[in-house]
Amino acid sequence: MRAVSLLSRRFIFILCAAWCLTPLQGWAATAEQNLYFIAVNTTRPPLNIREVRHALGMSIDREGLARLLRLKDASPAYAMVPPGLYGDSPHGNSPYMPLRGEMRAAIAEVLLGERAIDPAHPVTVMFIYPQGGIHAAVVKSFADVVIKFGVRVKPLEKSPADYAQSLRDGDFDLAIGAWTEPGKSPADYLRPFTQGSDPRNIARYAEPDFEQRFLEAEAEVDPMRRMIILADAENVLIQDQPILPVFFFAPTSAAGQGLSVLQP
């Protein structure tokens, strides 16, 4: 742990990025899947800091959750777009995807420590979620891990109406989210992060670099070139982590598994 703490933040991310195209062993996400995620209110400190969001993303035990909750057809998500939608085009994943166990924890500890967040100097975040056992289990699993790094989670279960209103008002730090209308193109998964996508941009994300790349892709007529530009746009999101992807799941299993989430 001490050796890792001596590494600079920049070096850590370069190290992880070298593996970002590594296939996820033992799982396969197909095209046209739903995405279950944790939305981050990017306007609220310290969640407005990218490295803090990365540290929180590393804290999610995606594989463990999928097994614990016995989710049929679920696969851990380390990106916003199901990889099957890119076809043969290259695409990225969160740089910490290949890391496991203690290494993720060590890096998360470093990133938070650099922002003066640790057990001796904790921060508290409000995590809202809609009524449902699976949502509560995800929140609890997340809270049990991040408390070790000095992040205290204040869970708040809400009725469907109150939950939707809180998303619209931005009255949350973290929130359970799910997109349950699977798209047929990567653009369908990326559009909610654009400036004109309200109210679906519940993370209140605003990044000109992403916006420029997305608009460039929309104007591109060559299908292969368009996919490459969309992958570039998604990589901006992967580096910024405005949401923390948890898992992809089949559209047909959403209601039966209690994964449906009311959006604003």
Image (cartoon, rainbow, N blue to C red):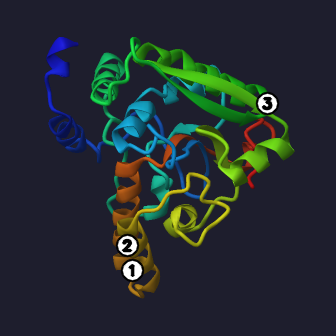
Question: Tag 3's secondary structure?
Answer: loop
On screen, residue 93 versus residue 133, left or right, reads left
Check contact, mark 1 vs mark 2: CB within 8 A. Answer: yes
* Residue 193 higher or lower than 105, as above or below: below
Question: Tag 2's secondary structure?
Answer: helix
* Residue 110 higher or lower than 81, as above or below: above
Give residue 157's position: percent from left, percent from top: 76, 30
Q: Residue at x 51, y 30 (%)?
A: 62
Residue holding disc 1: 216
Residue holding disc 2: 213
Q: CA distance from mark 1 to mark 2?
A: 5 Å
Residue 70: numbered disc: none
Residue holding disc 3: 132
Q: Residue at x 44, y 35 (%)?
A: 57
Mark 1 or mark 3, earlier in chain: 3
Amino acid type of disc 1?
Glu
Check contact, mark 2 vs mark 3: CB within 8 A. Answer: no
Q: CA distance from mark 1 to mark 3?
A: 40 Å
Give residue 30's position: percent from left, percent from top: 53, 51
* Residue 238 higher or lower than 225, as above or below: above
Amino acid type of disc 3?
Gly
Q: Residue at x 48, y 43 (%)?
A: 28
* Residue 230 higher or lower than 24, as above or below: below
Amino acid type of disc 2?
Arg
Give residue 146's position: percent from left, percent from top: 47, 21
Which quadrant: the C terminus? bottom right
